[in-house]
Amino acid sequence: MRIRAGLLAFVLATIACNPTGNPGPSPEPLADDQTLSFPIAQDVADFDPAMISTAADVDILRNVFSGLYKFDARLRELPDLALGQPTVSADGLTYTFRIRSDAHFSNGDTVAADDFVYSWNRAAARQGDYAGLFDVIAGYPAVANGSSAQMSGLAAVDATTLTVKLGKRSGYFLPLVGLWPFWIVDRKVIASAGEDAWSTKPETLIGSGPFRMSARSQGQSMDFVPVSGWYGAQKDGKSGTLTRVHVEVQADTGTAIANYESGVFSLIGYGRQALPPAAATRYTTDAKLKGQLALVPLGLTIWVGFNIGRGPFAGIDAGRAGRHAFSAAIDRKALVDALCNEKTTCDAAVGGLVSKGLIGYLGDGQDPNVKFNAEKAKAEYQAWDPTGAKVKGLN
């Protein structure tokens, strides 16, 4: 199954690009209150990048924190706090990153290379659910087991130069650096507010992202405002109209839909919140409502695999016919119709394991291993196991 998110949203503001040079329609005046509001199913569990463990929390906090790189909607990795791509040594072990000199935390503290050294060492030492991502860096095991406070592979050469030495060549290292455990935190704030307290209060939840928290009622709501002078803001004066983001914890999706339709919320679906079945049907079938629905691939594929090490499907070649017969017997369309809430939560993965829109997608219906054919499946199965002995007792 390919996982998706259904997002409902009214048009909040439009920035038009007119390449023809002809005058376009006059823009409508913006409302006085430029607040974006939406619900989430449950409160953020932990605001500390070192301890974040759910995708929904990442979706919220990527707006508060940042790192060397980030991913766009097509999962292309782009520089964020880094200036371009790193320089990599001939042996593939040492990466040198140049850091932008105009970056600041939301409280005005300057971002420097030693903030990465501190933040990454801290995240490795705290041993959150994703601390193991630092394992590729030389010296990680010593920090993980508490025998050292510093990974030997990290060094701040100067204020804008960071070097990272790996324990072994790892072609996947650069994509790791774009993930949330590699976001930076402000060591001055943590030293002042306390290791366990700094991330619990709006005034000390300091990051280097485009927004900062301005208010929070635990378990109920939180508010964010844009960071003045954020390094990533457009310099053309055409952005920055959003003045506040209000996030409300609302587990009941039926109530969330009602609040959206009455204008309380600007959108729903952010933070991996699925639409209730009745709403999914209305917004996918009603021509007037359909324009408010956007389906966003989440880059996540879930599948059921065969045990090729033991049992009737064992062996790359020996069990191939049986595996193919069972796969061909699955009507994926029927599964989607039964489970995917009008395709607003998932869809059949018929283009390979990679989500549509990403590099590696085979094309709609182009995965030859997932085509449903009941008659062919039955014939293949009977040829592979004519007496039923191979699958006897299988459950």
Image: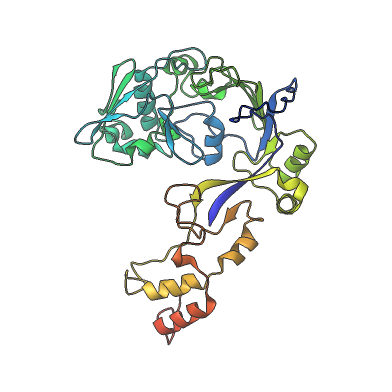
- Residue at 49% x, 72% y is 328
Judge left or right: residue 87 versus residue 394: left
Callout count: 0
- Residue at 48% x, 17% y is 105
Can residue 149 be seen here? The reply is no
Above/below status of 212 relative to 3: above
Judge left or right: residue 5 versus residue 145: right
Above/below status of 309 relative to 141: below
**View extreme (bottom): residue:** 387
- Residue 227 picture location, percent across and down: 56, 18
- Residue 342 picture location, percent across and down: 66, 56
Judge left or right: residue 241 versus residue 95: right
**View extreme (left): residue:** 91
Nearest the eye: 371 or 54? 371
Judge left or right: residue 125 versus residue 217: left
- Residue at 56% x, 39% y is 56
The colour scheme used here is rainbow
- Residue 269 picture location, percent across and down: 64, 41
Q: Quadrant of residue 161?
A: top left
Can residue 210 be seen here? The reply is yes
Nearest the eye: 102 or 206? 102
- Residue 43 picture location, percent across and down: 61, 35
